[in-house]
Image: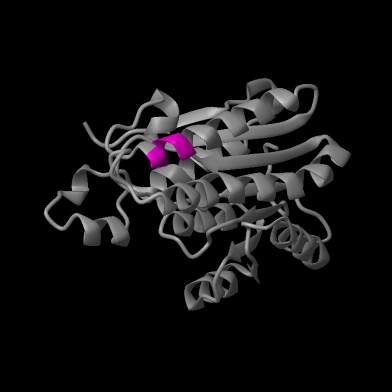
C-alpha cells in the first residue's frame, strides 16, 4: 500500500491527543478518513469537517459497534482499506493493591476494542488480499514487564500478542500489520495534567507516532515492517 491517495482509513479513538496528528498526516497524504469515537465529540466533528471525513459514534467494546463502524465507512466511501486503532487506557498500581475493577477496564479498553475492530475489518481486507491494520502498543508490550502498572502492562502485552499473531495468520496476503510502541510518556494534555512537575520536552512527540504509522502504511509487501518502537529524547 505505497500510495494512500483515495484510500479509506478508519481511525479509532479519534478524539484523543495521539489520534490528532495521525488524522492530519493521513489526510495530508490523500486518504479518506472515518473518525470513530465512543462519545459525541465536538473535537471529532471538527476534525472530520476539516479533513472531509466521516465521524462515527460507536462502542467498540461490542461486535455490533465495530460492524456499524466498518459498514458506515463502506456506505460513505464504497470501500475500506485500513484501520488505525488508538483506543486504549492507562492505570498505575501494584498488582495486590489495585481495585479488581481495573482488570476489566484495562482489558476492555486495550484488548476488547482492538479485537472487535480488527475482526470487523478482516473479511473486507481478506476478500481483496490487501490492506493495513495498526495498533498502539506500549513499552510493556515490547519488554514484557511493567512493575507498578501490572494490569496495564498485561493488557498491552495481550494486544501486542494479538497483533503479532494476526500478522502470522495473514501470511500469503498483502495485508500489512503494524505495531507502534511509545517507549515512554507521550506529550499529551492529559499527561501534562497528571504530571505537572515533569518536563514534557523529555516526552515523546505524538507527531512521531503519526509519522511511524504513515511510514508503515506506505511500505510495499517486499519492504514491509511490523514493529516500530518510538523513543523519547536521549
Magenta region, residue range: 151-155
Q: Position of residue 37 (x, y in %)?
A: 57, 65
Viewer can see residue 6: yes
Question: In the figure, residue 150 lies in which quadrant?
Answer: top left
Viewer can see residue 86: no
Identify the residue at image location x=50%, y=78%: 42
Point out the image quarter for the C terminus.
top left
Q: Position of residue 46 (x, y in %)?
A: 52, 75
Depth check: 26 or 195 in front?
195
Q: Please say which color scheme the image uses.
A: one colour
Identify the residue at image location x=30%, y=39%: 96
Q: Main secondary structure of the magenta part?
A: helix
Q: Position of residue 69 (x, y in %)?
A: 71, 61
Establish if 83 lies above or below 233: below
5 on left or right of 172: left
Depth check: 99 or 2 in front?
99
Identify the residue at image location x=75%, y=50%: 120
Amino acid at each position: 500500500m505505497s500510495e494512500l491517495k483515495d484510500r479509506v482509513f478508519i481511525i479509532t479513538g479519534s478524539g484523543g491527543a495521539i489520534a490528532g496528528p495521525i488524522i492530519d498526516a493521513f489526510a495530508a497524504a490523500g486518504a479518506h478518513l472515518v473518525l470513530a469515537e465512543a462519545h459525541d465529540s465536538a473535537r471529532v466533528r471538527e476534525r472530520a469537517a476539516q479533513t472531509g471525513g466521516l465521524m462515527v459514534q460507536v462502542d467498540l467494546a461490542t461486535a455490533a459497534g465495530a460492524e456499524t463502524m466498518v459498514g458506515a465507512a463502506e456506505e460513505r466511501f464504497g470501500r475500506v482499506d485500513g484501520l488505525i486503532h488508538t483506543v486504549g487506557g492507562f492505570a498505575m498500581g501494584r498488582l495486590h493493591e489495585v481495585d479488581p475493577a481495573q482488570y476489566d477496564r484495562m482489558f476492555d479498553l486495550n484488548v476488547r476494542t482492538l479485537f472487535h475492530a480488527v475482526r470487523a475489518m478482516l473479511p473486507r481486507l481478506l476478500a481483496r488480499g490487501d490492506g493495513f491494520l495498526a495498533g498502539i502498543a506500549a513499552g510493556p508490550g515490547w519488554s514484557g514487564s511493567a512493575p507498578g502498572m501490572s494490569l496495564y502492562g498485561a493488557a498491552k502485552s495481550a494486544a501486542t500478542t494479538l497483533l503479532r499473531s494476526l500478522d502470522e495468520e495473514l501470511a500469503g496476503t498483502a495485508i500489512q500489520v503494524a505495531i507502534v510502541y511509545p517507549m515512554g510518556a507521550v506529550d499529551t494534555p492529559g499527561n501534562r495534567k497528571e504530571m505537572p512537575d515533569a518536563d514534557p520536552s523529555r516526552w515523546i512527540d505524538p507527531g512521531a507516532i503519526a509519522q511511524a504509522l504513515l511510514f508503515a502504511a506506505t511500505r510495499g509487501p517486499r519492504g514491509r515492517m511490523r514493529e516500530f518502537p518510538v523513543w523519547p529524547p536521549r
